């Protein structure tokens, strides 16, 4: 239990939260990072914990495991002086300072500034077989995992911009892509659709849904069972991976009604900064970015949030 007031509390411990922690600690803000606890809420280490190999984070030419990378960032943040609490945030009060942040304890943590780095979670179809094969061929990130299926046949599910982007990216890496969409038209922007439809390595299956991912018994993806919604027929497409491109959901529920959100639920920040509508509350990483969604960009905005937080406190003469 703590009633201590921190200069800065960082909520979330993905690349954004941990980079913010490193910078805030180095600025001598003595930050507290509430790193999340349960897979249902925030996950310590964030989405990268579900990624096997990370091959695009600069500085790791031999690739690095997602959880290994996050552990290194966490060690670095701790060594610089960040205090960690492993708990889910249950409630916040950002109506006045010091801001209040509750976990499962009755007393809130208090903070002069807050960095929200709660990230986003990928949407999946919700099939049991899909869940069992996550990270064994079921992925929601082509840039992260596509290279594991070099030269193989894969499926992408979805019909939005992400699906187009994932399919196009994968077509440059894998043998062939089957894009499966539940309706007979895409919601994606025309330009991105045109790119997909012109790509000879991408085949589109309209009006189809995935009803099962195979093969749970083998512990790897060997195909997807699809259903043609027009005829009701099912068949198996032999693929080595299935990429869900069904959109993401930002973890902003905790802040709804307090911090201004975009219509799509992502947190609003002033362009070129990490400032939210509340002075002293900053947002970094995927919780405010639905365009890039990369570990490196999340880390970049985490750095910005810590620097802005420090400047905010310095301008008040509080630090
Ligand atoms: P969207 O919500 O736009 O698309 C999700 C897609 O998944 C839809 O086609 C939807 O089908 C389908 N879907 C959802 N649930 C299911 C389900 N249970 N079964 C089958 N299909 C399902 O998400 P995106 O991630 O594509 O895009 C999010 C936002 O980010 C958009 O505003 C987009 O424009 C933007 N974006 C922009 C990019 C860019 O400009 N470079 C790149 C990526 C995203 P249906 O269409 O039938 O509803």
Image (spheres, rainbow, N blue to C red):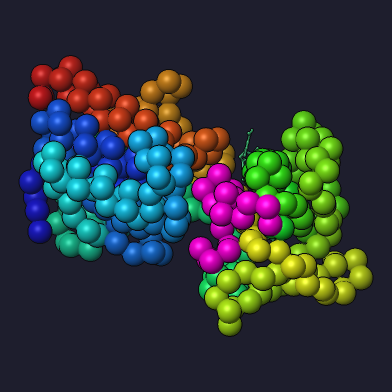
Residue shown at 79% from the left, 48% from the top: 202
266 is higher (above) or lower (below) than 49: above
Q: State the residue in front, 279 or 139.
A: 139
Residue 69 horizontal side relative to residue 55, left or right: left
Total label count? Answer: 0
Give the percent coordinates (x, y) of residue 155: 70, 58
Query: Magenta part of the protein: which range?
Result: 134-152
**Image quarter in which the N terminus is found:** bottom left
Query: Percent from the top left, x then y, of residue 233?
Result: 87, 74
Can residue 278 be spotted in the picture?
no
Q: Residue at x 72, y 51 (%)?
A: 175
Residue 61, percent across and down? 40, 40
Residue closer to the observer: 277 or 74: 74
Q: Which residue is painted at 22% across and 58% down in the image? A: 86
Left or right of 278? Residue 75 is: left
Instruction: Answer yes or no: is residue 290 visible.
Output: yes
Residue 33 is one of the magenta-drawn residues: no
- Locate residue 291 relative to residue 75 in the image: left or right: right
Position of 43 relative to 170 (above/below): below
Image location (x, y in percent) of residue 118: 37, 47
- In the rendered image, the residue lying farthest to the top is 315
Q: Tell me if residue 209 comes above or below residue 318 in the rendering.
A: below
Residue sitting at x 66%, y 74%: 214
Identity of the residue furthest to the right in this view: 231
Question: Toward which corner of the image does residue 235 lie, by quadrant?
Answer: bottom right
Q: Quadrant of residue 238?
A: bottom right
Magenta region includes residue 139: yes
Q: Quadrant of residue 181?
A: bottom right
Depth check, front residue: 183 or 112: 183
């Amino acid at each position: 239990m703590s009633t201590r007031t921190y200069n800065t509390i960082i909520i979330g411990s993905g690349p954004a939260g941990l980079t913010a922690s490193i910078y805030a600690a180095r600025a001598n803000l003595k930050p507290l990072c509430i790193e999340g606890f349960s897979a249902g809420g925030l996950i310590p280490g964030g989405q990268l914990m579900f990624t096997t190999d990370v091959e695009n984070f600069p500085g790791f030419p031999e690739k690095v495991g997602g959880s290994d990378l996050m552990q290194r960032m966490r060690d670095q943040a701790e060594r610089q002086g960040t205090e960690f609490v492993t708990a889910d945030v249950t409630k916040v009060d950002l109506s006045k300072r010091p801001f209040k942040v509750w976990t499962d304890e009755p007393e809130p943590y208090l903070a002069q500034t807050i960095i929200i780095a709660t990230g986003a979670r990928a949407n999946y179809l919700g099939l049991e077989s899909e869940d069992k094969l996550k990270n064994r061929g079921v992925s929601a990130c082509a840039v992260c995992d596509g290279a594991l299926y070099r030269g193989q046949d894969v499926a992408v599910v979805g019909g939005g911009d992400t699906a187009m982007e994932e399919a196009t990216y994968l077509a440059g890496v894998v043998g062939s892509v089957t894009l499966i969409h539940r309706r007979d038209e895409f919601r994606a922007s025309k330009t991105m659709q045109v790119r997909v439809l012109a790509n000879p390595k991408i085949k589109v299956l309209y009006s189809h849904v995935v009803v099962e991912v195979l093969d749970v018994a083998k512990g790897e993806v060997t195909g997807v069972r699809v259903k043609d919604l027009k005829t009701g027929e099912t068949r198996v497409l032999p693929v080595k991976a299935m990429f869900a491109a069904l959109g993401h959901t930002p973890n902003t529920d905790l802040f709804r009604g307090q911090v201004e959100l975009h219509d799509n639920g992502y947190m609003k920040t002033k362009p070129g900064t990490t400032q939210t509508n509340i002075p002293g509350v900053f947002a970094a990483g995927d919780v405010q970015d639905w365009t890039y969604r990369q570990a490196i960009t999340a880390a970049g905005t985490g750095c910005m949030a810590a620097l802005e937080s420090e400047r905010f406190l310095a301008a008040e003469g509080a630090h």
